[in-house]
Amino acid sequence: MTDPGAGDEFGVELAGTLDDEPVVTLAAGVRLNAPGLVATGVNPFAAFDLVYTYELRLPMFDGAIDDTTYREDRPPVGSAAGTVPCRASAG
């Protein structure tokens, strides 16, 4: 999730698997979108966007129930920061 080329975001991407099938995937972090706000000290939290995505898959129930995947892309916390789509890698 971190983009060292741009140097403007950092975070963590975690995944849990069962028999090489992804079950839980979580990516969360922040992206600096207004460096000037940090330098001036005027609400430095507004200078960052939250980056978040969560997915829960239950592959053991594929075919037994209709929907075996849950996805969420809204952070579970509120802040002055905006929210942007996460470009988490799959697999």
Image (cartoon, rainbow, N blue to C red):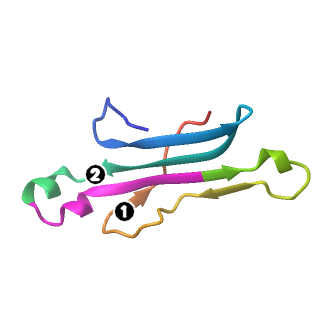
The residue furthest left is 40
In the figure, is residue 74 to the left or right of 30?
right
Q: Amino acid at mark 1?
A: Gly
**Image position of 65 with respect to 86: above or below:** below
Does the residue at mark 1 contact the one at mark 2 (Cβ under 8 Å)? yes
Of residues 20 and 10, the one nearer the viewer is: 20
Image quarter in which the C terminus is found: top right
Query: Which residue is found at the position 25% from the left and 63% from the top?
Result: 46
Query: Which residue is found at the position 76% from the left and 50% from the top?
Result: 58
In the figure, is residue 82 to the left or right of 20?
left
**Image position of 56 with respect to 21: above or below:** below
**Residue bearing mark 2:** 33
Magenta residues? 41-54
Q: Position of residue 79 (x, y in %)?
A: 34, 68
* Mark before the other along the chain sequence, 1 or 2: 2
Which element is circle 1 on?
Answer: strand
Query: Which residue is found at the position 8% from the left and 59% from the top?
Result: 40
Dot 1 crowding, Cα within 10 Å, few <14, some 14–19, many 20+: some
Query: Which residue is found at the position 32% from the left and 63% from the top?
Result: 81
Q: Position of residue 45 (x, y in %)?
A: 24, 62
Which element is circle 2 on?
Answer: loop
Determine which of the numbered discs, if any, sits on residue 2 in the image: none
Dot 2 crowding, Cα within 10 Å, few <14, some 14–19, many 20+: some
**Image position of 29 with respect to 19: above or below:** below
Quadrant position of residue 84: bottom left
**Residue bearing mark 1:** 82
Q: Amino acid at mark 2?
A: Asn
Q: Position of residue 68 (x, y in %)?
A: 78, 54
Image quarter in which the N terminus is found: top left
